Image (tube, grey):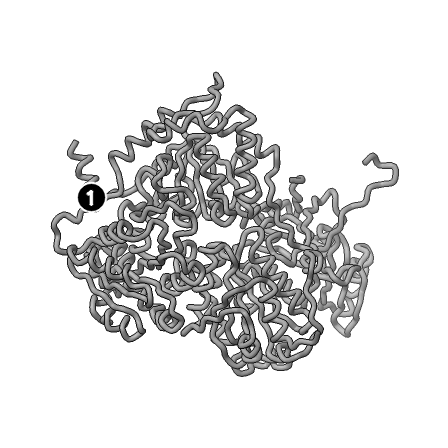
């Protein structure tokens, strides 16, 4: 069967099982947009290519399937550079197809030419410039394989216009050997002797913490993690990328560690004698000053990327492998050592899990550790004070939103204060219900990512919790959402500032506020929402918060934007000042005062 | 992990040799160079050439390991999809060669001295001008260092070194294992 390169590309995507793609056409990619008319693949037409990339990310993060985006050459391709970088930092599987000028014009500074494989070399897992139409099926298959296996990540395929128009004989590569990837062999199973060594360390631990990262979600390892936690009785912290990997309402869960983590999660890691890092990478926002991080802890580090083992902290036991598989292997090893399931369920229910399993004489109890952890939780819970203030506290908005929305709502955020409040005050009890930009910290992520998430999970309520600064960066994609009937809901925590920067200027730059004021009503978010085909709602007082949310939750035929006017002076606590030790964690002033008053 | 490959250069032990087999595809060198630059790894020298199999090329990299732990350099390199395999070469287990070309300004009265020096060092005179000589030496990096120091006694107009290439030493026949 003869196909043009363009037809072969679309057929390759269909063969790969792609159901939806996000994109925007232009000159160099024009040939590929023609067969889309005859394809089973749904194409979502975005208003800016950055939106296509973040939508594909949101889609991938909630479904576990690779997100696909298509753009034209030059500016179309450079506009999707930020999502590629974002996906690379957060290990999100993405396949981006960019048009390129004709092969004969490459290197001549042709119209809309850009060396996008060169530009994205450092922010993709791999990229390809296709030079022969007959390479298209093989390259597409290789691209999906690379994006979705090992440590997932974004890939880019650059397709010159003349190649799209060249005929080729259709085929599909049936085996891995056909993909021509001689240097790509990700390891998934852990080394047995390392697993045994890890199990031995776990059985000797007196102050253990399971330090859970995004790798647990990527490996679909939440169930295995639950089993591991319950069998060992170890406390669990879930990083910003792992919120939902372990239920927040589980008694073993300590919540989020890091710069704006809660006191107990941060301090438990600092005082631990064993950190079991599962798919986490010792990010600087988690460790604070590395030299002062968890000084007394031995480390077991499980990661599918060998380069993460020892990159920041040299572990006592490093295990390269898929988090789910290694967790299951650890369970087998622990079972062999007498840790069976079930006989501690009562203790977990009571919130005082001791050491389960057959009590070996030399196995230390972790009851003392739990007593310490519970004492920290009691003294330093997450805290804010709405009181009877007229100004709406942003945390109160998040809590009300949480309480009035379905428990499995997908929450999407941008980057900044609102992101931290969302992560802190939502109760994540289900995996794949939290979508945010972690490593890259991409402002403007929320609106398009929420749209992609809703496309991926139309059965779920999707709420974006966004900042006013972030919203202004990518709000135009709500036009896409309205046109495509994708009913996302956006809660803007509108404090009229670039809030996180304002907080740093208040705390570390002597309250010298430089270029952070945005205005609460320029733009008018309600009118803007309406102009984009959405319902716009405004809530200005604490009393208006719940009714606004209820109204938004009752609308399911179009996007909704709620402009919550929140207290501009509220800061995110706790906070570990940048570059400082996690021991220097700063709690809410009310909590600090209460402690010094005793 | 095998023993670290320490390269002695003027008593300096900061360098390691990596022999990297890569796919012979467009842009592979840029991927390797880009990785070193964005991760802050320093390269002391780098030599690329095709192998006998035209699907692959070999890059011999001498790495400055004070800029990053060797293990981290290797693991990051190994993440590049086009990198097929990486081997570390310890100097005692490797044969290493490097080539030096130098043009020396020397008038007829001292030309004989230079030619003699080149002969003693088992180099070659590859080009002769009225008041300049171009000489060549292909030898172990240490010997090339020595030769370069000896040439420094003359006026060097231009000097180029290729960076080292290396292959594992072969076992002697009858060697156990």
Q: Is residue A386 left or right of residue A488?
A: left
Near mark 1 (Cα within 10 A), the count class, few <14, some 14-19 or many ≥20, is few
| Chain for disc number 1 | A
Residue A46 appearing in the image: yes
Residue positioned 54% across, 64% down in the render? A18
Q: In this view, does A373 lie to the left or right of A385?
A: right
Residue positioned 54% across, 59% down in the render? B37
Q: Mark 1 points at which residue?
A: A589
Residue at the limit of the structure toward the bottom, as seen here = A111
Residue at the limit of the structure toward the right, as seen here = B174
Give the quarter of the figure containing the C terminus of chain A: top left
Q: In this view, does B169 lie to the left or right of B37?
A: right
Circle 1: element type: helix
What is the x, y in percent for residue A325?
56, 41
Give the quarter of the figure containing the N terminus of chain A: bottom right
What is the x, y in percent for residue A76?
48, 74
Instruction: Please determine whether, in this image, residue A218 is positioned above or below residue A158.
Output: above
Residue positioned 22% across, 71% down in the render? A524
Question: Which residue is nearer to you in this view: A10 or A138?
Answer: A10
Instruction: Please determine whether, in this image, residue A2 is positioned above or below residue A249.
Output: below
What is the x, y in percent for residue B56?
73, 60
């Amino acid at each position: 069967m003869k196909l043009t390169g363009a037809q072969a590309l679309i057929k390759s995507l269909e063969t790969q099982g792609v159901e939806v793609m996000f994109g925007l056409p232009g000159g160099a990619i024009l040939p590929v947009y023609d067969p889309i008319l005859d394809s089973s693949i749904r194409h979502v037409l975005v208003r800016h290519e950055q939106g296509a990339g973040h939508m594909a990310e949101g889609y991938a993060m909630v479904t576990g399937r690779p997100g696909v985006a298509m753009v034209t050459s030059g500016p179309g391709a450079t506009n999707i550079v930020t999502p590629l970088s974002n996906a690379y930092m957060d290990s999100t599987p993405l396949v981006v197809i960019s048009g390129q000028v004709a092969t004969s014009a490459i290197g001549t500074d042709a119209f809309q030419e850009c060396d996008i494989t060169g530009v994205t070399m450092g922010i993709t897992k791999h990229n390809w410039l296709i030079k022969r139409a007959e390479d298209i099926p093989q390259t597409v298959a290789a691209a999906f394989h690379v994006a979705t296996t090992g440590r997932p990540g974004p890939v880019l395929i650059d397709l010159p216009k003349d190649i799209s128009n060249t005929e080729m004989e259709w085929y599909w590569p049936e085996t891995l050997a056909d993909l021509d990837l001689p240097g790509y062999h990700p390891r998934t199973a852990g080394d047995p002797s390392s697993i045994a060594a890890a199990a031995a360390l776990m059985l000797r631990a007196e102050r253990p913490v399971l330090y859970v990262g995004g790798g647990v979600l990527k490996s679909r390892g939440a169930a295995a993690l639950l089993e591991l936690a319950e069998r060992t009785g170890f406390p669990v912290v879930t990083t910003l990328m792992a919120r939902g990997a372990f239920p927040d309402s589980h008694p073993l869960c300590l919540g989020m560690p890091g710069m704006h983590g809660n006191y107990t999660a941060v301090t438990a890691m600092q005082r631990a004698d064993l950190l079991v890092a599962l798919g986490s990478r010792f990010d600087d926002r988690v460790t604070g000053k590395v030299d002062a991080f968890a000084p007394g802890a031995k480390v077991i580090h499980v990661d599918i990327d060998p380069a993460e083992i020892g990159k920041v902290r040299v572990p006592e036991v490093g295990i390269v492998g898929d988090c789910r598989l290694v967790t299951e292997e650890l369970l087998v090893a622990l079972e062999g050592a007498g840790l069976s399931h079930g006989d501690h369920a009562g203790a977990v229910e009571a919130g005082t899990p001791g050491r389960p399993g057959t009590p070996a004489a030399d196995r230390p109890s972790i009851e003392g550790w739990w007593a310490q952890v519970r004492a920290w939780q009691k003294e330093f819970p997450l805290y804010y004070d709405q009181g009877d203030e007229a100004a709406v506290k942003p945390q109160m908005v998040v809590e009300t939103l949480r309480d009035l929305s379905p428990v499995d709502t997908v929450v999407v955020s941008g980057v900044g204060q609102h992101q931290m409040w969302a992560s802190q005050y939502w109760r994540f009890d289900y995996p794949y219900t939290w979508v945010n930009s972690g490593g890259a910290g991409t402002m403007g992520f929320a609106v398009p990512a929420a749209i992609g998430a809703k496309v991926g999970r139309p059965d779920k309520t999707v709420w974006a919790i966004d900042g006013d600064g972030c919203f202004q960066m990518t709000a135009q994609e709500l036009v896409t959402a309205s046109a495509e009937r994708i009913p996302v809901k956006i809660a803007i925590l509108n404090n009229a500032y670039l809030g996180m920067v304002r907080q740093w200027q208040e705390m570390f730059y002597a309250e010298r506020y430089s270029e952070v004021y945005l205005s609460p009503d320029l733009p008018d978010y309600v009118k803007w929402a309406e102009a984009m085909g959405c319902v716009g709602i405004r809530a200005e007082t604490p009393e208006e918060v719940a009714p606004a949310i209820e109204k938004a939750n009752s609308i399911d035929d179009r996007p909704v934007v709620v402009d919550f006017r929140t207290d501009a002076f509220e800061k995110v606590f706790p906070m570990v000042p940048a570059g400082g030790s996690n021991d220097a964690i700063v709690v809410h002033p009310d909590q600090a005062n209460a402690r010094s008053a005793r | 992990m095998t023993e670290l490959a320490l390269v002695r250069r003027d008593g300096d032990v900061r360098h390691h040799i990596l022999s990297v087999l890569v796919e012979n595809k467009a842009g592979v060198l840029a991927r390797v160079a880009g990785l070193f630059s964005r991760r802050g790894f320093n390269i002391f020298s780098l030599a690329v050439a095709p192998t006998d199999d035209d699907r692959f090329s070999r890059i011999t990299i001498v790495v400055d390991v004070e800029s990053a732990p060797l293990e981290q350099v290797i693991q990051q390199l190994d993440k590049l999809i086009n990198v097929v395999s990486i081997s570390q070469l310890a100097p005692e287990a490797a044969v290493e060669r490097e080539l030096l070309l130098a043009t020396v300004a020397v008038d007829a009265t001292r030309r004989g001295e230079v030619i003699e020096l080149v002969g003693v060092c088992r180099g070659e005179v590859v080009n002769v001008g009225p008041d300049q000589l171009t000489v060549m030496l292909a030898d172990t990096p240490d010997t090339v260092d020595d030769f370069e120091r000896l040439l420094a006694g003359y006026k060097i107009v231009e000097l180029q070194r290729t960076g080292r290439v290396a292959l594992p030493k072969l076992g002697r026949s009858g060697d156990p294992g």
